[in-house]
Image: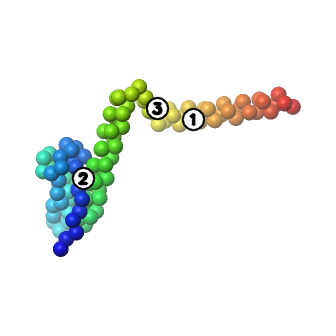
Amino acid sequence: MKQKILIEPCPFCQSKFCELHEVHENYATVCAECCARGPVSATREFAALVWNAASLRSAVSSLTTRIYNATDVRPPAPDRFELESFEAQIAKKEKKQTLEEDDE
């Protein structure tokens, strides 16, 4: 008896009608609504794992967007954030050096 494998909703249309299909002695998860197909994998478990990971990333992205749309909070662009963080570290170091020179 095959072990039952949980399949998350489709990452594209959020349909719950997704199932594993055999593809030339391999497996892939397919959405019955929009016909999206996950990558072909050697095992049923890995095909489901890859599909579920994409579905969860989609859900997190959707939830994050809803939170940002409901508030005025916006995440900084990654490279801008890193640059500001780096500049803040330099400014802090320079300020510390200035304070040490004033103490002497």
Front residue (pair 92, 83): 92
Q: Nearer the viewer, mark 1 or mark 2?
A: 2
- Residue beneath the point at 32% across and 33% down: 66
Instruction: Look at label 3 and name its amino acid.
Output: Pro
Can the viewer see residue 79 in this picture? yes
Instruction: Look at label 2 and name its amino acid.
Output: Glu
> What percent of the width, then of the height, locates residue 1?
18, 74
Q: Indicate left or right for 40 with 70 as reference.
A: left
* Mark 1 and mark 3: Cα distance apart in space: 11 Å
Instruction: Look at label 1 and name its amino acid.
Output: Ser
Reading the image, the residue beneath label 1 is 85
Can the viewer see residue 40 in this picture? no
Q: Nearer the viewer, mark 3 or mark 2?
A: 2
In the image, residue 39 sits, relative to residue 81, either above or below, namely below
Q: Residues within 10 Å of mark 2 (few under 14, many from 20)?
A: many
Q: Quadrant of the C terminus?
A: top right
Q: Indicate left or right for 96 with 60 as reference.
A: right
In the image, residue 11 sits, relative to residue 29, either above or below, namely above
Which residue is the extreme one toward the bottom?
Answer: 1
Q: Residues within 10 Å of mark 3 (few under 14, many from 20)?
A: few
- Residue beneath the point at 43% across and 29% down: 73
* Total numbered circles: 3
Reading the image, the residue beneath label 3 is 76
- Residue beneath the point at 21% across and 65% down: 4
Marks 3,2: beta carbons within 8 A: no
Considering only order in the chain, which callout, 2 or 3, is on the residue closer to the N terminus? Answer: 2
Reading the image, the residue beneath label 2 is 8
In the image, residue 34 sits, relative to residue 94, either above or below, namely below
- Residue beneath the point at 28% across and 62% down: 46
Which residue is the extreme one toward the left?
Answer: 32
